[in-house]
Amino acid sequence: MKANKIEKHYLGILKYSDEYIKEKKLTPIQLKELLENFEIKKYEAEKDIYRLMGVTPIILKGDWGTDMEAYKKNMESKKPQAQTEGITEQLIESENKRFNSFADKNSNYQGAIKVIQIIKNTLEQEPEPKQQPEANKKTADYEEILSLIKKKENKFWKGLPMEVVIKHFEVMTTTMNKNGEPYLSKKQFISFLKRGFLNIKAEPIQKVNCLSGEKGFVIKRFYEFFALAAGEYKHPNKTERFISLFINCFDNWESDSVKPFFKAHIAKENW
């Protein structure tokens, strides 16, 4: 796709033409990061389109979501439920056509679609990297992803740099539980950062790898994060938001179960 054929008003899409990507020599990880950003832009544009459509409550009911593709994928497995709720193939097809008519006029949506395709095409054309030991490759990928996250804005609280967040919580990937396993794998840690601090809701809720008797120790690290934010970065002295951070990202315990442990000196061991 040539840059001069891309409409400039589409999300500044000219910047993300194939020529731009080649010139910048973006790595596959950087391309995937860019792809993730534009998938979010596409999702936000879709929500705007559905609002303009005035989608009926029956279409948005339950876990069907707001994605027509999701409807189609779920039709077979949930056909009895779909029919009970009045969600028929004809209704889906009708709404799909109506969505497309709105989407054709939405420059944000069209721009995101074009950028996503450019990036996917570029990724497909990437030459196979030279083979290196798997452990070395994973470490290099992990470090590169962290370096990208460090530059992002902390959407949990803008006053706290992501570099500080990473430094505080990364110890959970190197400290071992009673079974000799890290409390968070590197993959879990990256997912936690994206979900909790970059507000990427597509990231799954994780489970801290802890055993009986380690609850206080795990929650202590989150309390220490609250103390760091309140003491050194002038965050309002309220714990509720930090308890919610844990609950939003991990499903080990319910909020009411976390609150009694969310205090100083709850565990003798230090991180």
Image (spheres, grey):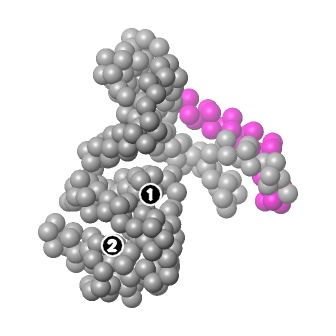
Residue assigned mark 1? 185
Q: Amino acid at mark 2?
A: Phe
Circle 1 or circle 2, nearest the eye: 1
* Gap in angstroms between the C-alphas marked 1 and 2: 17 Å
Q: Secondary structure beneath disc 1?
A: loop
For residue 264, which numbered disc appears in the image?
none
Q: Which residue is at 29% across, 72% downward? A: 271
Residue 209 is left or right of residue 58, and the answer is left
* Residue 107 in view here: no
The residue shown at (36%, 78%) is 217
**Element at label 2:** helix
Counting from the top left corner in percent of width and height, residue 48 is at 50, 45
Front-most of 163 and 19? 163
Q: Residue at x 32, y 56 (%)?
A: 155
Range of residues picked out in magenta: 81-105
Question: Relative to 16, is 219 above or below?
Answer: below
Determine the image quadrant of residue 8.
top left
